[in-house]
Image: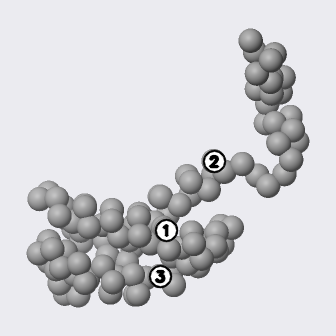
């Protein structure tokens, strides 16, 4: 069983006590790590900010649950949440190529998904 470091336990305790200032500290401490991941996967500065916010909200909510128990370093936990939020979001984005091109690549019968409103009526 993982034994959290003193610093991680203090951060967890502060979250449980409702100390929102700890979120700012977590943001500053881990923004670089998350930014590297986002930039490696075609993200930008706005994506980093959004992902950090969503990650910290998830940590806040999870830690405040009575059954929460940290089973890894807090930084590892934070990164895992960010990664699990980020990759599915990027996976489903439409590539930046013309619509007709990606439709014909991804669908065997593009006519099924490309009908106009007049054709479907």
**Mark 3 crowd level (few <14, some 14–19, many ≥20, 10 Å Cα):** some
Q: Quadrant of residue 9?
A: bottom left
Where does the C terminus fall, quadrant-wise? top right
Q: Is residue 80 left or right of residue 92?
A: left
**Image point (16%, 59%), residue name:** 65
How many marks the image carries: the answer is 3
Q: CA distance from mark 1 to mark 2?
A: 17 Å
Q: Position of residue 81 (x, y in %)?
A: 41, 63
Q: CA distance from mark 3 to mark 1?
A: 11 Å
Q: Position of residue 13 (x, y in %)?
A: 14, 77
Task: Say which element carries label 3.
Answer: helix
Residue indicated by mark 2: 92
Q: CA distance from mark 2 to mark 3?
A: 24 Å
Q: Are marks 3 and 1 in contact (CB under 8 Å)?
A: no
Q: Quadrant of residue 23?
A: bottom left
Q: Position of residue 20 (x, y in %)?
A: 23, 78
Task: Say which element carries label 2.
Answer: loop
Residue indicated by mark 1: 50
- Please tell me which of labels 2 and 3 falls first in the chain: 3
- Please tell me which of labels 1 and 2 falls first in the chain: 1
Disc on res. 31: 3
Where does the N terminus fall, quadrant-wise? bottom left
Task: Say which element carries label 1.
Answer: helix
């Amino acid at each position: 069983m993982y034994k959290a470091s003193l610093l991680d336990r203090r951060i967890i305790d502060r979250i449980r006590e409702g100390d929102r200032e700890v979120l700012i500290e977590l943001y500053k401490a881990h923004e670089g790590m998350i930014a590297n991941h986002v930039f490696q996967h075609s993200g930008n500065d706005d994506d980093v900010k959004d992902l950090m916010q969503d990650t910290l909200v998830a940590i806040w909510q999870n830690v405040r649950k009575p059954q929460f128990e940290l089973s890894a370093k807090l930084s590892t936990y934070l990164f895992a949440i960010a990664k699990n939020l980020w990759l599915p979001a990027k996976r489903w984005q439409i590539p930046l190529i013309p619509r007709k091109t990606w439709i014909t690549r991804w669908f065997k019968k593009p006519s099924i998904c490309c009908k106009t409103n007049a054709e479907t009526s």
